[in-house]
C-alpha cells in the first residue's frame, strides 16, 4: 500500500512527506530532479511531472492513495485533471487534494476558480477523497521578513476583514493524518471537505502589531494597495501570476478569508494539540536572523 505525493519538494509537500515517514507509511514522492532530493529514510523518489503522462503513469503504478498538490501555474487546472484521470485509470480511489479556502467564493481569482473545478471533478468521479481548503499560509511572509526588519513596514495588503492564516507545518500534518485515514480505511469513505485555518483571524494592523511586539520596535502596516503588490510581484514572477495575486488581495480587502464556525476546534481535535500561531511564526523568524 503506497501513498504518492505530488509537489513533494515544496513548502507543504515536504511537510507531508516528513509526517508520513514519521508514521511509518510507504511513501513515494514525485519530483522533477532526483539529484536534488533529500527525503527521510524509506521514502522513494520517482522522476516526473504532472504533464508527463508516461512518467506519471509509472509513478502511479501500484499506488493506493494519492496526495494531489499542484502549484499555481498557467496550466494548473490541466495538470490536476490529467493526474486525476490517470489515477482513476490506475485504479486509485483514495485521494487527498490541496485546494484553497473560499474556492467557491473567490471565483474571479484564476487559481481559486481552477481549484474549484478540480474539486468538482473529484466529486463527479466518485473518488473517496478529502479536500483540504487552507487559508493563506503564514509562511508566505518569509518573503517579506527583510522588509519588515529593515524598513519597519509589513507590506502585504491583507486589509481589515481578517485572514485566518495557517502554518504550512500544520497543513502538512493534517494532510498526513487524512492520507493515512483514507489509506488504512477498510473501504471507501465519504467525500470530506476541511477548512484549514490558524487559531487567529489577522488583519494588516494586527500582524504589524505582532511584529512590533516580537521585534521590540514599531512596525507599521503598509496599507491596502493591491496595485503596488502587483507591480512588486511582476519583478519576480510572470505578469499573469502577479495579476492573479492582486485579484486575491482585492478579495482579502473586500471580504477577508474567514473560518467557519467550529473550524479551529475541528483541527485542534484532529491534531491533538493547539494550532501554531502567527506570533510563534514571527518569533521563529526573528530568532533565526
Image: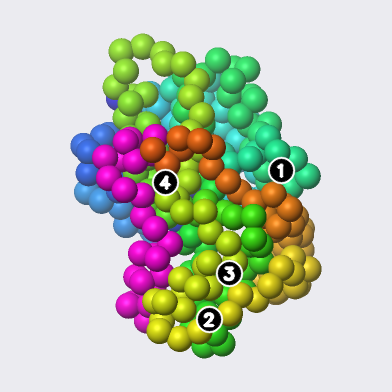
Q: Whole-percent x and y of residue 124?
A: 63, 17
- Between the residue at mark 2 and the residue at mark 4, the CA separation in whole angstroms equals 28 Å
Mark closer to the observer (1, 4): 1
Comes first in the chain, label 3 or label 1: 1
Mark closer to the observer (2, 4): 2
Query: Magenta stretch: dominant SS?
Result: helix
Q: Residue at x 64, y 60 (%)?
A: 160
Q: Whole-percent x and y of residue 123?
A: 59, 20
Residue 33 appears in the rendering: no
Of 124 and 162, nearer the camera is 162
CB of mark 4 within 8 Å of CB of mark 3? Answer: no
Mark closer to the observer (3, 1): 3
Q: Residue at x 55, y 15 (%)?
A: 126
Comes first in the chain, label 2 or label 4: 4
Residue 23 quadrant: top left
Q: Whole-percent x and y of residue 109?
A: 74, 47
Amino acid at each position: 500500500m503506497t501513498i504518492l505525493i505530488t509537489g513533494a519538494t515544496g513548502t507543504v509537500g515536504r511537510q507531508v512527506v516528513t509526517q508520513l515517514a514519521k508514521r511509518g507509511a510507504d511513501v513515494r514522492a514525485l519530483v522533477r530532479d532526483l539529484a536534488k532530493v533529500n527525503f527521510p529514510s524509506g521514502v522513494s523518489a520517482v522522476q516526473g511531472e504532472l504533464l508527463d503522462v508516461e512518467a506519471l503513469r509509472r509513478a502511479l503504478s501500484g499506488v493506493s492513495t494519492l496526495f494531489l498538490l499542484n502549484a499555481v501555474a498557467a496550466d494548473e487546472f490541466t495538470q490536476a485533471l490529467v493526474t486525476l484521470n490517470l489515477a482513476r485509470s490506475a485504479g486509485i480511489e483514495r485521494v487527498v487534494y490541496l485546494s484553497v479556502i473560499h474556492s467557491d467564493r473567490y471565483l474571479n481569482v484564476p487559481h481559486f476558480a481552477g481549484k474549484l473545478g478540480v474539486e468538482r471533478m473529484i466529486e463527479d468521479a466518485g473518488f473517496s477523497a478529502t479536500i483540504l481548503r487552507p487559508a493563506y499560509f503564514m509562511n508566505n511572509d518569509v518573503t517579506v521578513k527583510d522588509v519588515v526588519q529593515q524598513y519597519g513596514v509589513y507590506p502585504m495588503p491583507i486589509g481589515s476583514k481578517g485572514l485566518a492564516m495557517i502554518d504550512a507545518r500544520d497543513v502538512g500534518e493534517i494532510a498526513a493524518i487524512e492520507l493515512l485515514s483514507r489509506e488504512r480505511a477498510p473501504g471507501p469513505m465519504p467525500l470530506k471537505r476541511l477548512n484549514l485555518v490558524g487559531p487567529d483571524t489577522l488583519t494588516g494592523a494586527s500582524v504589524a502589531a505582532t511584529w512590533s511586539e516580537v521585534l521590540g520596535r514599531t512596525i507599521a502596516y503598509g496599507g491596502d494597495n493591491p496595485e503596488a503588490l502587483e507591480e512588486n510581484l511582476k519583478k519576480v514572477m510572470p505578469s499573469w501570476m502577479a495579476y492573479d495575486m492582486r485579484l486575491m488581495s482585492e478579495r482579502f480587502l473586500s471580504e477577508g478569508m474567514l473560518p467557519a464556525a467550529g473550524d479551529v476546534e475541528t483541527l485542534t481535535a484532529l491534531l491533538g494539540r493547539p494550532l501554531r500561531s502567527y506570533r510563534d511564526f514571527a518569533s521563529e523568524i526573528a530568532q533565526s536572523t
